[in-house]
């Protein structure tokens, strides 16, 4: 019986191979009708083609010759070693086959990607397509669409403003950047090994958290500068509403120069920013005396309040604003800091959670984890590279190629010298704000 079963399996394999061979032949077969009624032909003549009419090279010739079916038919005949003179109807039939294949390409592709093709073939074709044309797997990020000319005008105005700030300084310049980001009490975990759900054996693997813990978020005000000696002394502020962490944190001393400010809301407002600028000015006067301080801010509404400029004047800090809508590309904190910091926070959180008996992290312990993440990332990185790659240092000589590509430039265009005009500066700020922009550009004038 075993011998009979083996023969049946062998016969089945041969039949399937023969079926596949016949299907390939039939798909590349062209039927030739009799060219003249008086010819005696027993039915249509069938010609089998090794190179089918829907081959890419045949369709490429058809397209490159201006969709000339006659030339494509000659090319198809030459590829298959056929004599175009016999039978006389062969040129017309091959030309019609090429045209028919060209018209069916869109339909064939649509059926293929709707499931007509095999899954493995689809994956392999897509992989080759991505490698050949420089694509990658990912998700298209949703963001506001800005015309290319507007992006170029904003970037050029910002770079001209920065060049004017460097030329206008009478002392060594210390460039800083501050931005706010949201941090969660329950950070998103990295991909790892979790238990598989087995019926009646193990529950689903989850990280237990209450609804309040999942919604709990704080605002972290991070400051970076281009000087590695000053960076460890800069204040890093965590804004809390006082409910999750308590009115007074139980941690005696936080690492990374992290301070916790309790207020009515964890959102940053212009009063919070005034307090921050006052603290920053006092820290800078001790850490870097004899410098001129320039603080880069985005165009958030709380940053554009009239009282912020007055407080910055009192603290001897010059304000330069990043173009609205382009902070994702031109702000060093967005390009180089936040992704790195949050990844480190998630890593330390998961490490501490794995060491805990019940896997529960108390808020005071979370605060220690956050301070450790801040301490291990901010003072350990030379942020001057982040300032150079966005064009805020060295006169845009080290702007990264990805940024130029985003703006549609192969090389950096010449940036005019001198301060930007009022119209150029207005392009940096939001249109809805009625701001005297030249007060920021001509900072040293009374």
Image (cartoon, rainbow, N blue to C red):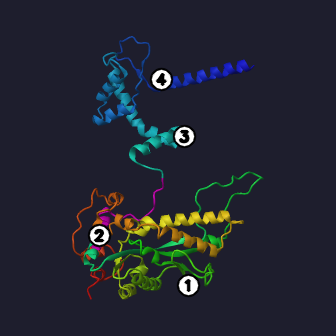
Q: Is 93 displayed left or right of 248 in the figure?
A: left
The residue at which mark 1 appears reads as: 264
Observer-side mark, 3 or 2, equals: 2
The residue at which mark 2 appears reads as: 159
Is any part of residue 351 visible from this angle? yes
Q: Where is residue 257 in the image (x, y as percent from the top left)?
A: 51, 77
Answer with the quarter of the image where residue 66 lies: top left
Q: Earlier in the sequence, mark 3 or mark 2?
A: 3
Q: Position of residue 222 (x, y in %)?
A: 47, 74
Verify whether residue 94 appears in magenta.
Answer: no
Say above or below: 398 vs 91: below
Element under label 3? helix
Q: Of the numbered discs in the image, which one, if any, rests on residue 25?
A: 4
Q: Between marks 2 and 1, how big is the CA–CA gap?
A: 38 Å
* Most distant residue in the left direction: 417
Q: Between marks 3 and 1, how big is the CA–CA gap?
A: 55 Å
Q: Between marks 3 and 2, how big is the CA–CA gap?
A: 50 Å
Q: Is 355 displayed left or right of 261 in the figure?
A: right
* Most distant residue in the top direction: 40
The residue at which mark 3 appears reads as: 119
Q: Position of residue 289 (x, y in %)?
A: 36, 82
Observer-side mark, 1 or 4, equals: 1
Q: Between marks 1 and 4, how big is the CA–CA gap?
A: 78 Å
Question: Residues at badges 4 and 2 in contact (C-beta under 8 Å)?
Answer: no
Q: Between marks 4 and 3, how big is the CA–CA gap?
A: 23 Å
Is any part of residue 326 visible from this angle? no
């Amino acid at each position: 019986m075993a011998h009979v079963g083996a023969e049946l399996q062998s016969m089945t394999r041969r039949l399937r191979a023969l079926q596949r061979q016949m299907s390939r032949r039939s798909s590349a077969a062209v039927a030739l009708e009799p060219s003249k009624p008086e010819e005696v032909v027993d039915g249509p003549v069938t010609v089998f083609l090794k190179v089918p009419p829907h081959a890419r090279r045949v369709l490429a010739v058809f397209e490159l010759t201006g969709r000339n079916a006659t030339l494509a038919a000659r090319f198809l005949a030459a590829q298959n070693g056929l004599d175009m003179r016999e039978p006389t109807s062969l040129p017309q039939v091959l030309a019609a086959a090429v045209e028919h294949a060209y018209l069916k390409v869109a339909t064939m592709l649509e059926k293929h990607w709707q499931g007509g093709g095999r899954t493995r073939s689809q994956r392999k074709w897509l992989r080759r397509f991505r490698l050949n044309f420089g694509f990658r797997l990912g998700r298209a990020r949703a963001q506001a669409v800005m015309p290319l000319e507007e992006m170029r005008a904003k970037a050029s105005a910002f770079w001209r403003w920065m060049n004017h700030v460097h030329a206008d300084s009478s002392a060594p310049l210390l460039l800083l950047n501050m931005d706010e980001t949201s941090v969660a009490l329950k950070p998103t975990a990295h991909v790892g090994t979790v238990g598989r759900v087995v019926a009646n054996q193990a529950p689903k693997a989850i990280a237990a958290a209450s609804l309040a813990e999942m919604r709990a978020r704080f605002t972290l005000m991070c400051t970076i500068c281009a000087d590695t000696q000053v960076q460890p002394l800069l204040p890093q502020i965590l804004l809390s509403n006082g409910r999750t962490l308590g009115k007074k944190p139980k941690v005696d001393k936080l690492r990374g120069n992290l301070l916790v400010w309790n207020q009515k809301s964890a959102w940053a407002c212009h009063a919070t920013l005034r307090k921050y600028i006052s603290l920053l000015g006092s820290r800078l006067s001790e850490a870097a005396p004899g410098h001129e301080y320039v603080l880069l801010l985005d165009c958030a509404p709380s940053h554009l309040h009239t009282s912020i400029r007055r407080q910055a004047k009192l603290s001897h800090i010059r304000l330069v604003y990043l173009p609205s809508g382009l902070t994702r590309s031109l702000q060093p904190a967005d390009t180089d800091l936040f992704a790195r910091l949050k990844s480190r926070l998630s890593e330390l959180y998961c490490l501490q959670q794995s060491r805990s008996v019940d896997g529960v992290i108390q808020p005071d312990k979370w605060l220690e984890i956050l301070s450790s993440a801040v301490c291990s990332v901010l003072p350990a990185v030379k942020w001057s590279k982040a300032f150079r790659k966005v064009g805020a240092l060295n006169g845009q000589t080290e702007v990264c190629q990805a940024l130029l590509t985003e703006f549609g430039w192969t090389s950096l265009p010449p940036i005019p010298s001198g301060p930007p005009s009022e119209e150029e500066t207005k392009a940096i700020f939001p249109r809805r704000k009625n701001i005297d922009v030249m007060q920021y550009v001509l900072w040293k004038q009374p």
